[in-house]
Image (cartoon, helix red, strand yellow):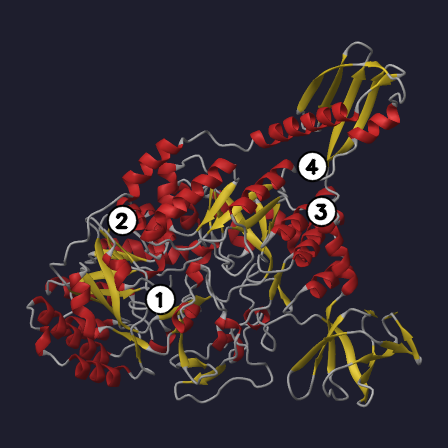
Amino acid sequence: MILRIPEILAPAGDFDALVAAVENGADAVYLGGKTFSARAFAGNFDDMEMEKAIKYAHLRSIRIYVTVNILIDNSEMKDVMNYLKRLYDWGVDAVIIQDLGLGFLLGRLLPELNVHGSTQMTVHNAEGAQFLSQMGMDRVVLAREVALDDVPSIKQETAMDLEIFGHGALCISYSGQCLMSSLIGGRSGNRGKCAQPCRMTYALVDEKGRFVGDQEMGNHLLSPRDLNTLELLPLICETGICSLKFEGRMKRPEYVATVIRIYRQALDRFKADPKAFQVFPEELHQLAQIFNRDFTQGHLLGNPGRDLMSYKRPNNRGVRLGRVEEVKEREQLALIKLDEEIRVGDGVEIWVTKGGRQGFFVDKIYHGGVQVKEAGKGETVFINIIGKPKVGDRVFKTHDIRLMDEARTSYLQPRKLIPLHMKISALEGRPIILKGWDDQGNEAAYTSPYLVEKAKKHAADEESVAQQLNRLGGTGFTTGALSFDLEEGMMLPASELNTARRYLVDHITKQRLEKYRYPTVSREEFDKKLKVWIGSRKTNQKGKVLNIAARVAGMEEARAALEAGADVIYLGGETFRSQGSCSLDQMQKMGEFSAQNGREIVCDLPNIFHEKERKQIYHLLDQAAQGKWSGLLVGNVGGISAAKNAGWGKKLYGDIGLNVFNDATIQYLSQNGMSRVTLSLELTFGQIEKLNPGAMEMECVVHGALPMMVSQYCAVGAVLGEKSRENSCTRPCLHRSFGLKDRMNYVFPLEMDQFCRMHAFNPQELCLIEHLDKFFQLGVHWIRIEAKRYRPEAVYQVINTYRRVKEAVLSHTVNQLDLNEMADALKKTSGAAGFTKGHYFRGVL
């Protein structure tokens, strides 16, 4: 078996974190600019800092990847492409992107630039990797839900480099498919502004709103633990991945320093002797101390169920220090028998019986009545406290001052310097000749205009010359081997030696940086191409047609939709367990029925399909190709490749999951055989108005339950079904409905599909019945009803209502309808907590 030691890819939210990563053993660092980055609230780097960061890293042979991993609006495309041109000119090693349109334009304007597909692209199978490879990308960050066992098969079917996450915070949803923060508060994860509502408290309730959870388990039902793969490194090195990525651009430099140091040392030990590899307890302890929400190995060994989650606490819990054994309220002291050592300056948190948690820094420690600065494990001491803790309350150390000081020293006093070897020759009547070289074979030589002459007072010697040559502070270099050919009694002016030294540093620095440069793309050439692709365009034409599409659950719902006037039915996809299933045979019969009635029925391909589910997907594609299906609806790039692999020859439509946000994405999907795309749920009317789809038909969702997330983790299965790493789920979801109730008493409906993945929906359903004329004016060809959670009666009533309004729009008689009354009737039909207009007016920019 061939082992591959992956690069350590460290995060950096600011320059200190970059230095911390480099000094502690990172092979590469990813960071973001002040704009167009998925961690908008990190410190990030302006242009001057970015250029400096790239030079700093490249001088030390460290790669830099810049995140441009958000969805890009048409109005931003020129600015983002100019930003990417600057990164190209600075020699950035790669950019990490989410937006398909951005990848399309990069392939045409900056084809030599290395591009990595972000985990926001939701690539979780070989088909997804194949799609990005054909697009011209070099690497993909696999979805966190991909198991290690699946990685080799993905690697075998694509030439792309594969990257996985190795440590840090986890998202509960498949990245790129989460609209929870966006729909709740307008802060979009697809725009780098996620507010992390998954870290809030929720109660599991049944269809009647009754609590059915476990009070003792905790109420942070969507908050995962932190990923920790230190003990999985041998397995990871067997998969063939090229890069192990560490989350943490929002974390402090001390966190970056500690985590990267520990993984660097562990990987180096494994590389030196794989058979003898072991993880030391102190390494695990330090990882927990620097930050943890408890640890998990994520989905890398399969679905862990409840073992993925941090139900009781959504933030750092530190390490257990002990329990309160006595309280002296007057002196504000608590007696603790220590499970860990403690020092003045450590941060401590007491989980009090009432009132939550109280955090403070230790400034007093008493042992045996004597005030001390530190105490060891097993000792019983009094420490200062705040508040009113009780005997038995648990105490945790959340800040270890010694660990933090060690980490801080690593980047404030950097030691990772480049040896610069030098040889100096100084003979009377001849110029000073200083030659220098590094360990990469770069070399330079300086010949002074000054001719060496005898000293009148202070003759130079090896010690005085070395003193001048050693002045390399701030250059990234340190003195390596020095050799001298000095004639005794000569005068060597310090200014000449300084000039010679600076010359070597400048020229060897340039040589070390030169290898990172891309082929030159002139400003004139770039601007010319940019104007062609995103130059001035004519305004989108007013619509001529407006058709109704409906996504439904099964046979009866499909019949109801057709009878109500739907022009196209999307059938298949994810089957929700609360509703039963629709067999392939039934779907084929519905295809025949719709064809007889002159309607279109489209096969809805599941958005998520992992290695073990691929056979089902290709079987579905084969059956759909042979039946009366008119087209295929796909919501993931893997689905597009799967259709091509299966020889799909019918129509191909794009679903919500593709995050269609701009003209470039539409154009690229058109070139990949699509004739209709569903626009992103995060676009406003104003943004849609500026889209120029060409021959592509645009579809917008106008009504129904909006998907907020899809997750490999199932709260129902974990809480009620006792699903864990060891235990299988008892499937409490069969023919039942559940929801998550938040602090505002809104209930987010949950559905579990045939693959046991959880889908969460917005409590308020989308309703744009009063604005269908706006879609028509904007040239939208199709309006969609998301009716998958509706029973046949509701399907009929909703679609029939929209059909009536659509016909009024087309006949210019919509003013004769009472749209408010129709909206009220729909509200009664849906049974939702209310209606929302989504982002069509407020947006996420």
Quick one: label 3 or label 4, which is nearer the N terminus? 3
- Amino acid type at mark 2: Trp
- Amino acid type at mark 1: Glu
Quick one: label 2 or label 1, which is nearer the N terminus? 1
Position of 482 with respect to 107 (left or right) is right
* Image point (61%, 75%), residue name: 313
* Image point (41%, 40%), residue name: 136
The quarter of the picture where residue 120 lies is bottom left
Mark 3 touches mark 4? (CB < 8 Å): no
Residue 436 screen position, x and y as percent: 72, 24
Residue situated in front as seen by the camera: 699 or 682: 682
- Amino acid type at mark 4: Thr
Between disc 3 and disc 4, the foreground one is 4
Residue 80 screen position, x and y as percent: 40, 47
Quick one: label 4 or label 1, which is nearer the N terminus? 4
Looking at the rendered structure, which numbered label has been put on residue 648?
A: 2
Between disc 4 and disc 1, the foreground one is 4
